[in-house]
Amino acid sequence: MKKIVVMTSGEGSNFSAIVNSGIVVDRVITNNASANVVKRAATANVPCEVFDKKTGDQEHGIGWSERRINETIPEDTDLIVLAGYCSILSPHFCEAWTGKLINIHPSILPAFAGTMHAIKEAWDYGCKVFGVTIHHVIAEVDAGAIIMQRCIHPLEGDTLEQLTAKIHTVEHYAYPSAIRKILQIPEVK
Ligand code: GRF
């Protein structure tokens, strides 16, 4: 059985999509104690560890929570899946997990890299095609090798909210599919 860790800071809808697709997630790591993913993990019966960035760093200095996270992730982990993890990981962490660390970003990279508001920025720019990118993580933000991309063409009259929902739905299919491809986990019939 492949060992998969999901790291996320917020809602956790991608985590749920991965679990609901039948992929076994070993643990969730979050740096936000009030993230909704904490509840989602409990519902899915997946252990969730919280390394709250704010309190951790205040008490122990910058890098403390990341060091603790690194100690927590089992060495034989096959894949660390970032899904809305709102902290930049250090070059040391990225290098330690090269090839086993992936991220999803709601744009067609390299467009709208390095922003937490990629969909809104693409919308404001007047883009006619939107999308998601699943990529390897390197120290440079949103710059690792691309694993999978999916395009979304908004319908005439779509609002930003409707488009955002469509993009998230595409993420929820693409991420499990990319994880299966990387780890050679067969699709469930
Ligand atoms: C997703 O849109 C993902 O592309 C971005 O952060 C969001 C996380 O959403 N990196 P959720 O927490 O999985 O619902």
Image: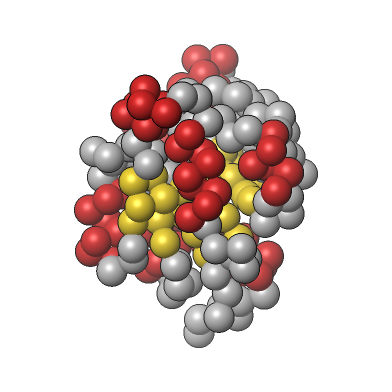
Classify residue 42 as left or right of residue 16: left
**Which residue: 62% across, 49% down?**
102
- Please tell me whether residue 67 is drawn above or below residue 185 in the rendered image: above
Q: Quadrant of residue 151?
A: top right
Residue at image point 63% right, 26% down: 113
- The x, y position of residue 180, in whole percent, is 60, 69
- The total of numbered circles placed on residues is 0
Residue ranking furthest to the right: 145
- Residue 164: quarter of image: top left
Q: How is the image coloured?
A: secondary structure
Q: Quadrant of the N terminus?
A: bottom right
Instruction: Report whether 31 appears left or right of 178.
Output: left
Q: Is residue 130 above or below residue 124?
A: below
**Residue 59: % across, % down:** 36, 26
Q: Does the image show residue 177? A: no
Q: Is residue 3 above or below residue 81?
A: below
Q: Residue 172 location, x and y as percent?
A: 45, 55
Q: Position of residue 171 (x, y in %)?
A: 49, 50
Q: Is residue 119 left or right of residue 33?
A: right
Q: Nearer the viewer, residue 48 or 168?
A: 48
Q: Is residue 26 above or below residue 156?
A: below
Q: Residue furthest top?
A: 125
**Residue at the spot 68% in from the left edge and 65% down from the top edge:** 182
Task: Specify the farthest residue to the bottom.
Answer: 189
- Name the residue: 47% across, 71% down: 23
Q: For residue 97, say whether it is visible.
A: yes
Q: Nearer the viewer, residue 159 or 58?
A: 58
